Image (spheres, rainbow, N blue to C red):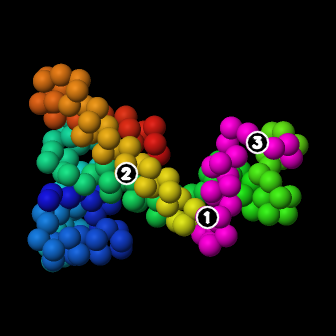
Amino acid sequence: MRVVVAGGHGKIARHLGRMLADRGDAVAGLIRDPAHADDLRADGSEPVLLDIESTDASTLAGQLEGADAAVFAALVVWWLIGGMTADDGYFLTMAQVRDDLGYVTDYYRWFSGTVAPMGWFVELQARWVAVSTATPWIRLPALGMGLLSWVLISRYVQPRLGQRVRRSRAAGWAAAAVFLACWL
């Protein structure tokens, strides 16, 4: 498998690159500083000099061509280093006060009235946060749903959009970019 790692000289990225290279995968590490190239070569990764923030979409798509794990990697990186959002705190609070009240509440919107349409989700999350309130643990279901959603889009939806879409790498990368922009 060919894996492209953005921020290829970062501590986690280099560790990931070594693990994947040892496993036999082809790893390309995207870097901005040419001085980091030798470190990546020593790790078994192919250094690719590319500033994601300033490059155009076609250049980036060319570097990502054949990268099976680019979307998965973006989701996993978000899962590990993304900050807590207002939604995370909102649902976490609803889940944490559930046991004190005896039912799922939406204090912020309904002043502790029961929440019929979203009650099942918060009931499930109340059990989930009883294990841990660490951000990666709280976001693990979202990561799983993101990975599943991408598999469904890339394997089942896109192929049904016609032969031109199915054969077009640009359509695949456009779908990946739109999916990540919405999901993250």
The residue depicted at 81 percent of the width and 44 percent of the height is: 114
3D distance between C-alphas at marks 2 and 1: 19 Å
Judging by the rendered image, the residue that carries numbered circle 2 is: 147
Image side of residue 29 versus residue 88, left or right: left
Judging by the rendered image, the residue that carries numbered circle 3 is: 115
Q: Amino acid at mark 1?
A: Trp
Which label's residue is closer to the chain start, 2 or 3?
3
Q: Amino acid at mark 2?
A: Leu
Q: Is residue 45 above or below residue 163?
A: below
Q: Amino acid at mark 3?
A: Val
Q: Are marks 2 and 3 in contact (CB under 8 Å)?
A: no
Q: Secondary structure at mark 2?
A: helix
Which label's residue is closer to the chain start, 2 or 1?
1
For the residue carrying disc 2, how many other residues have a C-alpha within 10 Å: few (<14), some (14-19), or many (20+)? some
Image side of residue 165 versus residue 93, left or right: left
Query: Residue 9: x and y, percent?
Result: 29, 67
Q: Is residue 157 above or below residue 32?
A: above
For the residue carrying disc 3, how many other residues have a C-alpha within 10 Å: few (<14), some (14-19), or many (20+)? some
The residue depicted at 42 percent of the width and 48 percent of the height is: 146
